[in-house]
């Protein structure tokens, strides 16, 4: 593959990987040490000015889907602020370097999105560092598979909701005063909102909440010219999955039950976010764009 426009077979565009059935690291995990190394489109994403001059904040922008989106946005001409946990500094540096290599501004703002005060501070620092804000991507997420409901600790339930749902509320609320007409908000949900797995009861229900939060907010903000949309990934090879998001025994065949027969790469998510962020999707509001290898959704 030369770039994302190369005409080829999506079944074989990326090889079918079979990671070892082992927990690779504790969460959140460092992408640099994930085996095999996930593809964020570092050597393939080609920009064409679709987000020229835009200013984007991407949570969880250090790795995985958020990292791929940060690279793509910079190559499309946007300045980018990323949030991530302090322990992920190494991955964040990789993304910052790639954004700056495009001649764009990169603002790195480490912190814990479970903390409402940090969420507000994050937006303030992003606005300050970028000189404004017109794209918000709520993408940070926590997913920890647990077989039985009795074994989901109160602490995990709290953390999953705070990371996936509360942070989206606090960050969006803080961002709204800065978003003028033409701005876009994109939230990352999941196939889990539609076909929830028995071992992801807490996580799957947060993803349903993200969907409905987004659809309601899209109705509220559309008259103001601010569009809210959602991207729903299927199984994507990221740190989230290799660090307990899936039980280790599921890793060797992850994504092989999709019609494309393979796991997706974060690089394959970026174009969906670029489309929804740019004005080319001007009449697309409250939509969920599925990027899941062909798994049917209602
Ligand atoms: P990832 O591990 O690369 O990204 C998740 C990021 O969330 C981390 O890098 C981290 O920076 C951030 N994060 C987690 N807890 C945080 C906290 N308390 N404070 C601040 N940041 C925190 O994995 P990913 O798969 O790219 O995940 C991105 C999004 O995609 C998540 O919302 C996830 O639910 C969603 N998603 C992933 C898949 C998949 O198969 N990988 C499928 C559907 C949806
Ligand atoms: Mg990370």
Image (spheres, rainbow, N blue to C red):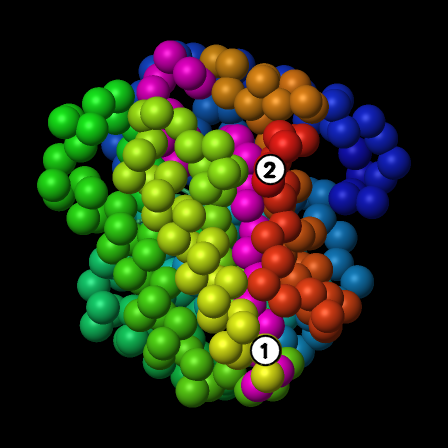
Residue displayed at 60% across by 37% down: 297
Q: Is residue 226 magenta?
A: yes
Provide the secondary structure element on which disc 2 rests.
loop
Is disc 2 in contact with disc 1, using a CB cutoff of under 8 Å?
no
The residue sitting at 34% across, 20% down in the picture is 247
Residue 222: numbered disc: 1
Q: Residue 155 sits in which quadrant?
A: top left
Q: CA distance from mark 2 to mark 1?
A: 25 Å
Task: Point out the residue furthest to the front here.
Answer: 298
Image quadrant in which the C terminus is located: top right
229 left or right, relative to 9: left
Label total for image = 2
Q: In the image, is 114 to the left or to the right of 127?
A: left
- Considering only order in the chain, which callout, 1 or 2, is on the residue closer to the N terminus? 1
Residue 65 shown left or right of residue 239 in the figure: right
Report whether residue 60 is seen.
Answer: no
| Label 1 within 8 A of ligand 1 by Cβ | no
Q: Which residues are magenta?
A: 224-251
Residue drawn 40% across the image and 27% down it = 197
- Compared with residue 250, is residue 32 higher up or lower down, i.e. above or below? below
Of residue 157 and residue 235, the one placed in the foreground of this image is 157
């Amino acid at each position: 593959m030369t770039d994302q426009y190369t005409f080829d077979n999506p079944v074989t565009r990326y090889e079918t990987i079979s990671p070892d059935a082992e927990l690779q690291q504790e969460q959140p995990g460092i992408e640099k040490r994930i085996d095999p190394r996930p593809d964020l489109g570092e050597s393939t994403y080609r920009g064409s000015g679709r987000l020229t001059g835009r200013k984007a904040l991407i949570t969880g922008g250090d790795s995985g889907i958020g990292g791929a989106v940060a690279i793509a946005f910079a190559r499309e001409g946007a300045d980018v602020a990323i949030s991530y946990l302090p322990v992920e500094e190494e991955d964040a540096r990789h993304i910052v370097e790639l954004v700056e290599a495009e001649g764009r501004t990169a603002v790195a703002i480490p912190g814990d999105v479970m903390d409402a005060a940090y969420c507000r501070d994050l937006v303030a620092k992003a606005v300050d560092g970028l000189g404004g804000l017109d794209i918000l991507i709520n993408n940070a997420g926590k997913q920890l598979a647990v077989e039985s409901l009795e074994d989901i600790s109160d602490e995990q339930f709290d953390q999953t909701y705070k990371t996936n749902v509360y942070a989206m509320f606090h960050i969006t609320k803080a961002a709204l005063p800065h978003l003028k007409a033409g701005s876009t908000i994109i939230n990352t949900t999941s196939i889990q909102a539609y076909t929830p797995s028995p071992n992801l009861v807490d996580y799957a229900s947060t993803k349903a909440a993200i969907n409905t939060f987004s659809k309601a907010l899209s109705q509220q903000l559309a008259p103001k010219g601010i569009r809210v949309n959602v991207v729903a990934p299927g199984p994507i090879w990221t740190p989230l999955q290799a660090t307990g998001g899936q039980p280790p025994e599921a890793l060797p065949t992850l994504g092989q039950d999709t019609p494309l027969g393979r796991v997706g790469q974060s690089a394959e998510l970026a174009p969906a976010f670029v489309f929804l962020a740019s004005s080319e999707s001007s009449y697309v509001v409250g939509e969920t764009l599925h990027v899941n290898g062909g798994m049917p959704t209602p």
